[in-house]
Image (cartoon, rainbow, N blue to C red):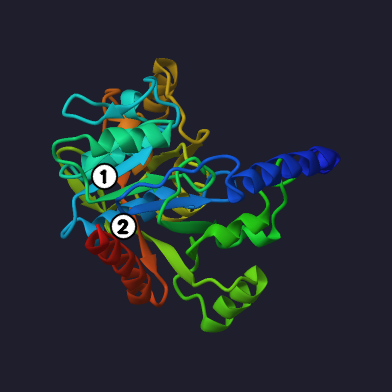
């Protein structure tokens, strides 16, 4: 696979030229970007998947929702609906996509919508009777038809965009120079104890005059389902089945697994068939089944016995208050100016 990627390097050069030309057209105003009279924060990355966008969107919701009416807008990857869809009491993962549905269930007081056409989605949100004060765009760093007011660029620790190559040789959707559009850069999935020396090395490697912050995935101390919860410390050594359909599941497995565990992995955003569900149940027998929060929203109505999920959240290694203040300053200034 690695050899094939290097053989495809000429295609990477062509792809890089195409995306760079597209960005040039937007930068020069030849292709039009649309701005809106509302604070819009875009969370995204330069690479394909696995940087922790959903935990960061949830972090922003927690930060802002006590003082502002929040709406999230994403394309709803792998949903079975089309066009603009506003989440309501009858929505499910098939209609919204797994990540928007997860947010809808987790934060029932905010507005959740999906639309591949972000411009149209924003226009629809602004026509609501209870229209939002702030819109959070999920995975919209390359969606340049809309000009957000604040861009958060995510890059995973150990897989930095500054070390990567364009698709298909590497995983970059666009040139590394696209990072210049970011207001802040957030290095995600760091070790909790990442030293200041290591942080400075990463900042120097990125080489941009941008604020750079460092976060880690904070795993909950309990697992949950609709009716009960269990402490991770109590089930750590229990014979159980762990399954994940996310981009980089290794830390999830490491946090929960013991020698006795059965581990199943599936592609990111996997749509579980009835046959697969039956195979999972057969392998689990009477064991606990523990999955990720994202997978749980697709599996919870599949009649799997003893199914639980492990919540996660994004936390900062250092300087979280400075990150928070940069967001609050942008939103506060923008809403006052309106």
Number of on-image labels:
2
**In this view of the protein, which residue sits in the foreground, 334 or 94?**
334
The structure residue drawn at horizontal position 41% and vertical position 36%, both measured from the top left corner, is: 118
Task: Give whichever of 253, 212 is nearer the camera.
Answer: 212
Give the Cα separation between the discs numbered 1 and 2: 11 Å
In the rendered image, is residue 76 in sight? yes
Of 181 and 319, nearer the camera is: 181
Q: Position of residue 3 (x, y in %)?
A: 83, 42
Place residue 242 in its image quadrant: top left
Q: Is residue 135 above or below residue 90?
A: below
| Residue 237 seen from this side | no
Position of residue 294 relative to residue 43, above or below, is above
Q: Secondary structure at mark 2?
A: helix
Mark sitting on residue 60: 2
The residue under the point 44% across, 39% down is: 244
Toward the viewer: 104 or 325?
A: 325
Percent x, y of residue 198: 58, 78
The residue at 42%/19% (across/down) is 273
Q: Quadrant of the N terminus?
A: top right
Percent across and percent down for residue 188 are 48, 61
Instruction: Check disc 1 and report the residue beneath it.
Output: 71
Considering the numbered disc 1 on the image, is that residue within a helix, a strand or a loop? strand
Tell me which corner region of the image, top left, top right, bottom left or bottom right, holds residue 334: bottom left
């Amino acid at each position: 696979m690695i050899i094939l990627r290097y053989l495809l390097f000429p295609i990477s050069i062509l792809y890089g030229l195409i995306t760079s030309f597209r960005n040039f057209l937007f930068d020069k105003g030849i292709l039009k970007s649309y701005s809106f009279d509302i604070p819009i924060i875009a969370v995204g990355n330069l690479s394909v998947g696995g940087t922790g966008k959903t935990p960061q969107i949830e972090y922003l919701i927690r930060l802002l929702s006590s003082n502002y009416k929040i709406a999230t807008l994403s394309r709803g990857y792998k949903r079975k609906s089309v066009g603009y869809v506003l989440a309501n009491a009858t929505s499910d993962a098939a209609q919204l996509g797994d990540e928007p549905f997860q947010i809808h269930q987790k934060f029932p007081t905010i507005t959740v919508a999906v639309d591949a056409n972000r411009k149209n989605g924003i226009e629809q949100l602004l026509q609501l009777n209870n229209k939002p004060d702030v819109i959070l765009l999920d995975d919209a760093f390359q969606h340049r038809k809309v000009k957000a007011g604040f861009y958060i660029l995510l890059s995973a620790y150990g897989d930095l965009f500054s070390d990567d190559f364009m698709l298909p040789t590497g995983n970059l959707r666009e040139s590394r120079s696209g990072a210049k559009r970011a207001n802040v850069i957030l290095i995600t999935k760091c070790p909790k104890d990442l030293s200041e020396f290591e942080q400075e090395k990463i900042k120097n490697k990125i080489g941009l005059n941008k604020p750079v912050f460092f976060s880690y995935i904070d795993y909950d101390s309990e697992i949950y389902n609709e009716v009960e919860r269990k402490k991770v410390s109590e089930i750590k050594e229990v014979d159980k089945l762990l399954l994940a359909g996310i981009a980089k599941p290794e830390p999830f497995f490491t946090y929960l697994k013991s020698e006795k565990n059965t581990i199943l992995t599936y592609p990111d955003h996997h749509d579980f068939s009835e046959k697969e569900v039956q195979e999972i149940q057969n392998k689990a027998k009477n064991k606990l089944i523990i999955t990720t929060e994202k997978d749980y929203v697709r599996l919870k109505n599949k009649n799997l016995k003893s199914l639980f999920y492990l919540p996660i959240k994004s936390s900062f290694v250092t300087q979280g208050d400075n990150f928070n203040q940069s967001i609050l300053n942008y939103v506060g200034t923008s809403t006052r100016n309106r």
